[in-house]
Amino acid sequence: MRFSNLLIPTSKETPNEATLQSHIYLLRAGFIQSVGSGLYNYLPLGKMVLDNISRVVKEELDSAGAQEVSLGFVTPASLWRESGRFEKYGKELLRFKDRKDNDFVLGPTHEEMMVNLVKQSVKSYKQLPLNLYQINLKFRDEIRPRFGLMRGREFLMKDGYSFHIDEEDMQREFYLMQETYSNIFTRLGLDFRIVDADSGAIGGSGSKEFMVLAQSGEDTIVVCESCEYGANIEAAVCRYIPPQNEKKEPFKKVYTPNATTIEEVSAFLDVDPVLCMKVVAKRALYDESSAVVMFVIRGNDTLQEIKACNSVDANELVDLSEEELEESGLIAGYMGPLKAPEAIRVVIDKRFQDATGLVCGANENEHHYIGIDISMLENVFFEDIVAVKEGDKCVCCGGNLYYTKGIEVGHIFQLGTRYSDPLKAEFLDENGKSKPFVMGTYGIGVSRLIAAIIEQNHDDKGCIWTKESAPFDIEVIISNIKDEMQYETGIKIYEQLKSKGFKVLLDDRKERFGFKMKDYELIGIPRAVIIGQKLEEGNVELIDRDDLVSKTLPLDIFIEEI
RNA sequence: CGGAGUGUAGCGCAGUCUGGUAGCGCACCUGGUUUGGGACCAGGGGGUCGAAGGUUCGAGUCCUUUCACUCCGACCA
C-alpha cells in the first residue's frame, strides 16, 4: 500500500495522557486514537496489527480442534442472575436497561452465553468434547483505566470454552490449550512465562496465567531461580518453618504503652518481629452479608489480600473505619487472636502452625500478651494468607524465589461445573443419566497483546514489531520522489516485492528523507529498503528495524536476497 | 472510593492573579525555493476558551453549580 493513501497520522509530540512507552508510540505512530477513558479507536495500522494477532490466535486454535463462533455483545441479565454473577461481579459489570425496562449487561466475559448456547444444542456425550471460542469485544468498567490498551474498558479478547464428560478429559484439554497458547505467544515473538494463578471472579480451580515479562507489567510474579516454578504473587506459595522462641517466657499479660506498631512492640519487648502476631482486620463482604475478620500474620510479613479473601470465601475484603473497629470491640494497635471478641472470625497464617513463644495484642489498651503458644488458641483456622517474599524458598526445589513483573496476556482455567451446575447445562451420559458439563475456559487479551508486544519490543525511537505482528513486512522508502529514477525504481521494487507475496508499504510521500526515516523508525516495520542517493551507483540500502544496521546492495542482488 | 491536578484551534501550551478586540509552537492550505536525518521564505484557514447559571457597561479571566479527563493511592493497625 502507498503511504500517501493511508491514514497514518504520526506526530512528533507526545500526547499528555500517555505514560507508558507502548501507549506513547502507538498514539504517536498513528496506530490508535484515544476517544475517552479506556476507550480507543484503531486506525488502519492498528487494525492491521489487531488482525495479525487474531489470525495467529485463530490458526493455532483451529489446528488444536477449537471452533470459532461469535456471541452477542449485549447479554440479557437473566442469564447472569442464574449463574449468580449479576450481583457478585461488582461494579465492573456495566448494567443497563432497554426501552422495555429489561436488564442487560455488556459482556465482560461470556461463560453464561456460551453455556447457554451449548445447553440448547448439545444433549449427548457423543457430541463431546467441544471447544468453542470467539474473538470479540468485551467491556469492563474498570475502576481506573490506564496504560492505553493495557487496561482499557472496552477491549478485544479471545475467549474459549470447552465442554467435557469428565474431569480427566477437561484436564487433557487444559494441557492442550496450555501448549496451544505457548505456540501462539511464541509465534508472536514474545518472551513469556507460564505461572500459577488465582482464579478470581471467574471461579474454578487450577488456573494458569501467561505473563509477558516486562518492567511495566502490572502483575508481580514470583519465579524460582533454579527450577520452572512461577506464580502470580496472588497465588504464590513457598516453604516455611514455624517460628519458635528460644527464650521460654511464661504466658502473661504485659504493659506496653505506646507500642502500637510491630516495630515498637518488637523493640519494647525485645522479640523478633517474626514472633509478633500482626493483626490485619478487614470486613469480608458476601452476597448478602458481611463479617469482620482478623487475619493474623507474622510481624515481618504482609497480607496477600487475594489469598486472604479466598481463605474466607468472601467476594471482597474492605478496610474497616476507626468507628467500625471500635464497634467490633477492637483496639487499633492492640488487637490479638487470644480472647478476641467472639463475633470476630480469626484466620491465622499457616506459618504460625505449631509456633511457640509468640507475642500478640491483648485486645486491651496498652497491653500485649507474651509467651503464647499457638495451641492455646481456640476456634481458629490456618490458611496461607501472606505474600511470598523475595528470598523465600521454592516449594518444588528449595531454590531462592524472586520477583519479576509481567503483563497478563493469557489465562486458562479448569472450571469444572461452576457454571453448568447453576445454569443446568447437562448432557446424557452413556448410561442415559443426566450430568453437568465439565468445563474449561481460556482467555487471551488480543488488544492488550498489541501493547505487550511494544512494551517488550521498542527503543528510544519507536516501535519494533515482531515478524508475525507487523502491519507490513517491509517498507520501500523513496528518498526523493522528484528524482525520476528513484521514483520509478521505487515503484518497480514495490511491485516486485508485492508479487513475491510480501506485505509492502511504499513511502511515496513528498517529504524529505529525514522525515520519512523518523516515521519509519517510529512505526517500526521490521525491514526497509531505501531507494536514494546510492541508486546512482546501482545500489539500494536494506535496513533492519531492530538494530538499525543497514546493508548496501546492488539492485539486482537485493531482489534475490529478500 | 480517597487525594492532587488539568480543561483555551487537530496536538503541545501561554493568557486567568490585576476583567477591556483570543495568542504562540507544531500540524494543515496556497505559491516558491530545498531534497540523506523531523527544511526555508511569503501568504492563508481554523476557536460555543469543557458546560450551565450569576456578577458587570463588558467575563477565557471573578462567583456558584456541573461534567470530562489525567496522575497518585487503596498501605497499616
Image: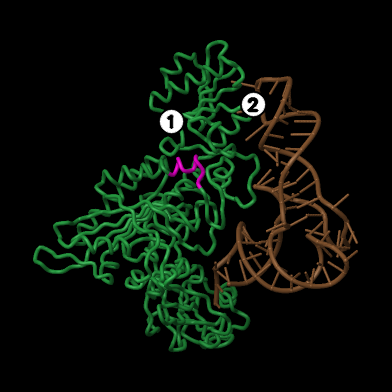
Occupied quadrant, residue A126: bottom left
Q: Which mark is residue A512?
A: 2
Colour of the chain lettered A: green
Check disc 2 and give the amino acid type.
Arg
Check chain identity for marks 1 and 2: say if they share one: yes
Alpha-carbon neighbours of circle 1 within 10 Å: few (<14), some, or many (≥20)? some
| Residue A405 % position (x, y) | 48, 52
The structure residue drawn at horizontal position 46% and vertical position 76%, both measured from the top left corner, is A296
Q: Is residue A347 magenta?
A: no
* Percent coordinates x, y for residue A221 in the rendering: 44, 55
Extent of the magenta region: A42-50
**Majority secondary structure of the magenta segment?**
helix
Check disc 1 and report its element: helix, strand or loop.
loop
Q: Amino acid at mark 1?
A: Lys
User: Residue A289 lies in what quarter of the image?
Assistant: bottom left
- Vertical arrangement, residue A114 with respect to residue A368, above or below: above
Can you say whether A142 is above or below A490 in the image?
A: below
User: Of A289 and A250, which appears nearest the observer?
Assistant: A289
Direction top: furthest residue: A537
From the viewer's side, name the closer residue of A91 and A410. A91
- Residue tagged 1: A503
Residue A382 appears anywhere in the view = yes
Quadrant holding the C terminus of chain A: top left
Tag 2 subunit: A
Q: Position of residue A242 (x, y in %)?
A: 40, 70
Picture residue at 54% right of the left edge, 53% below the top = A147
State how far apart marks 1 and 2 are (Cα): 24 Å
Chain for disc number 1 = A
Q: Colour of chain B?
A: brown
Residue A135 image point, x, y percent: 37, 51
